[in-house]
Amino acid sequence: MQTTNVVDENIKKIGELFPNCLTETLDENGRPQKAIDFDQLRQELSKNIVEGPEERYQFTWPDKRNAIRLANAPTTDTLRPCREESVDFDNTQNLYIEGDNLEVLKLLRQNYLGKVKMIYIDPPYNTGNDFVYNDDFDQNSEYYKHNSGQFDELGNRLVTNTESNGRFHTDWLNMIYPRLKVAKDLLSEDGVIFISIDDNELENLIKMGCEIFGDYNYIGSLSVENNPKGRKNSDYISVSSEYCVIFARSKDKSSFIENVPKKASDMTLDENGKYVHNSGKRVLVGDNSFNKKVTKISSDKNYVVYYNANTDELITKKEEVGQFDKALVDNGYVRYASEHNGFLIENTYTEDKFKELFKAKALQFSKDKIYEKNFSDTIRIKSQLTNREYEAIVRGEKKVYSMELTTTGGGTCLKNLFGVSDSPFPAPKNVGYLKLLISLFPSDPYIVLDFFSGSSTTAHAVTQLNAEDGGNRKFIMVQLPENLDESLEKADTLSKPSIESAIKICDELGFSHLLTEIGKERIRRAGKKIMEEHPEVRDLDTGFRVLKLDSSNMNDVFYTPEAFTEHDLFEDNIKGDRKDEDLLFQTMIELGIELSAKIEKKSIAGKTVWSVSDGYLMACFDKDVNETTIKEIAKMKPFYFVMRDSSMATDNVADNFEQIWSEYSKDTVRRIL
């Protein structure tokens, strides 16, 4: 009995934009209510560190504000294409990106903001033996570096986070927080992120996720039996499972499909040769207490049904309680009515919908009730995933279905693929497990991102699933090019065999000793194997574009007036080692064009011109470009046109540049590098 509380509405709006700024407090009557953490909000809107938080319910740790600042800080880096390491560069829609995933995510935010349907990551679990990123915060004192373990004595970016480190949890939280924060921006409105983790940071990860995505967008956690025999090195309990924490970008807009096949023993063939579930059938007409009472006889859900099983004829009528058509009953019809305690009850569906189900032979008639046949041969994914094999109904046929989740199976897959005795990755994820998660969404085209891609199991699973169900999913893999030789020096006894195997593979293939070389080769081999196993599949995308993180293509120029010379004025502003295609991709990033977009190389008036997305963007970085070339490009009316300032042949070309575009394509957005 009051008007809208504007403060509550504003709190709600701010909470949608910045879920991590929501906290709890008590109103004047001592009741809990949502409130805004203004210090946290100030931090979100500030480039500097905000001091002076008050005591309140919150999830915090040392350097959290730095982690927030790091997520919000811009990057000047770019992505450079590498055709020679790619597969089907010109046609593929898949990406493999080498580089620090935080910087890569910031760049992807330019092109893929709100476009990624699914993110899966398998980050370092913080077991005390694995490596974590240590990001360069602004606290650069020697004391901080020494105590945080931010850099090792060689200045390496990846360091082992041992349990003896006084910042054991802090370093891991500071590593994962900014990456999840940026990743959220990439998710579509109905997008979902899946994060594998074990006991060490499960609690912290859920709290962190609730802060970044909002606790109302926490879908739940899966318990995944990845090691049925249990780990021999576990203390007290032989650990056989890990977890998968799931958050939605917007839970009310997301959904999962039922994707686990039902057991064949739970299904029977009906009179028409279709499999029907033995239980769980919905009552459509008959005595029930769950539907509403009829208030209007004319209601489209109020009708009685007369059915003759001998002739398979059905008639619907409007009748009061106690009424019945004697003539129909005498002619072999059975009357079905929804009644309870002497009242008429609405049927489950409208009369028209009911008749549609009858025509589709989706009704089952018992003595006094009519059921809807449950033809569905799948069930909802359970929170406990266990390895099992059983006879199931898959797309209307009896087949043996296997839920394979083990890391042992994942390792065997890699060993067979590379023909080696040891897996080149410790405890790789199983392709079957990733396929199960990916298939929670319909097979419509969508993007799957993995920014801790490791052995590229996610890419393998996407390609495999596309081959099996005809889907057109795309993948983006992101991985730091970790030096395997350095990793071997730091590795513990359990990890060394895998790293040694990876180095051996690199040597056999003539690759450098980088972790990314194994991931790329795995995708190449998996694609070839899948094509051999599915020759019937056409147009399967088994390729990928390789992009590598690098500093900006533009030279850094900082001159004081006294140091400035006339020579500096005419010096090229683009680094000498950068190619035209490097400039093209930096332009695509800046203009928000997907990095998998179609690229064509054309010759116009004797000059090389790049056409992206069928002329949406056209670019020319060639030398001595004259008015003829610019005029021909303008006639094609691209949305964007980009060229180098130094590409113009003469001053006259520069003087007439705008006039040419105004005459032939005035709406084209022009940019000069």
Image (cartoon, rainbow, N blue to C red):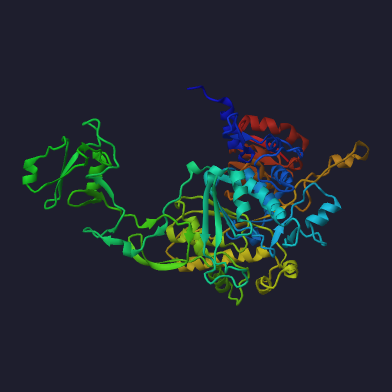
The C terminus sits in image quarter: top right
Q: Is residue 589 left or right of residue 116?
A: right
Q: Is residue 377 above or below residue 635?
A: below
| Percent x, y of residue 651 | 77, 35
| Percent x, y of residue 99 | 69, 55
Q: Is residue 474 above or below residue 631?
A: below
Q: Is residue 482 left or right of residue 474?
A: right
| Percent x, y of residue 204 | 63, 52
| Percent x, y of residue 618 | 63, 42
Numbered circles on residues, count: 0
Q: Is residue 510 visible?
A: yes
The quarter of the displayed image where residue 150 is located: bottom right
Q: Is residue 31 above or below residue 198?
A: above
| Closest to the observer, 138 or 291 | 291
Q: Is residue 188 visible?
A: no
The residue most toward the front is 29
